[in-house]
Amino acid sequence: MAAERREFDGIRKRMGNAKQLVWQGAKFACEAEWQGDCWWMVANGPGEALVLEALKEKKDVDGMISTGLCGALDPALRLGDVVVSGNARIDTRAPFVRGTVLTIDQVAATASDKRTLRNQTGAIAVDMESAAVEGKAAEWNVPYLCIRAVSDRADDTLPLDFNRYRNQRGDFSRTRIALAAIARPFTVMPQLMEFDRNCRRAVDALGDFLADCRF
């Protein structure tokens, strides 16, 4: 389970055989075979409420993974580092960092926000969906993992406060974000383009990691 379809791009391009699924309550869903396992990849937007909307109906699964991007809270984490938490076994040769991933209801947009969250909770990373997936895994009595790649470091302030550009459903408005960037072409626009490149690199690193894993 991820927030956005693009967060699956890294693993999907490695699988090469994904086919679209009809999944009630989700914006995107596909199925793929990898190393003898069947993967269902589902995305419905940012936030716990949208995760729960896509997981209303109990599914016959052997385990659940909350995946995608995260913001670092631990200053030691670098762009593209993979963070793992949860109770399921994971077998991989790839490096990763074990630690608590904190779920909050908005983007941690500033270095100050992240520092406060780190001091209050001791978590090493932050996202907006994992707690909901973990709750569903417990309800369905299946193993759970959170596997996320760092898209912004603990001392990074994002180019925009993306919380200001969410619609009533909770999605981020790409149009409004683009207009905000265009309004400040020499400051926000270059920073936004750099952040997008960082996200792409993190998604690719996440794909490498997931492709190497056995669960």
Image: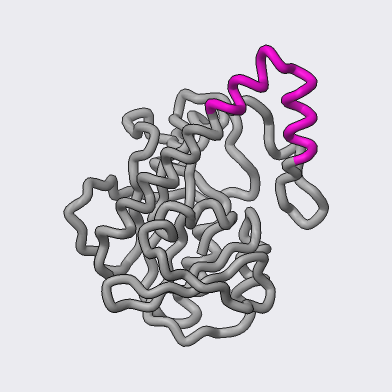
Q: Main secondary structure of the magenta part?
A: helix
- The colour mode here is one colour
Locate residue 119 relative to residue 112 in the image: left or right. left
Residue 35 x, y percent position in the rendering: 27, 72
Residues rendered magenta in the picture: 175-194
Instruction: Indicate whether residue 184 is drawn in magenta.
Output: yes
Relative to 3, say whether 204 is above or below.
above
Relative to 206, say whether 213 is above or below.
below
Residue 66 x, y percent position in the rendering: 46, 61
Q: Nearer the viewer, residue 69 or 131?
A: 69
Residue sitting at 63 percent across and 72 percent down?
54
Relative to 147, say whether 195 is above or below.
above
Residue sitting at 65 percent across and 69 percent down?
26
Task: Please tell me in which quadrant of the rendered image residue 138 appears.
Answer: bottom left
Residue sitting at 29 percent across and 49 percent down?
98
Which quadrant, please, contains the C terminus?
bottom left
Residue 176 x, y percent position in the rendering: 79, 37
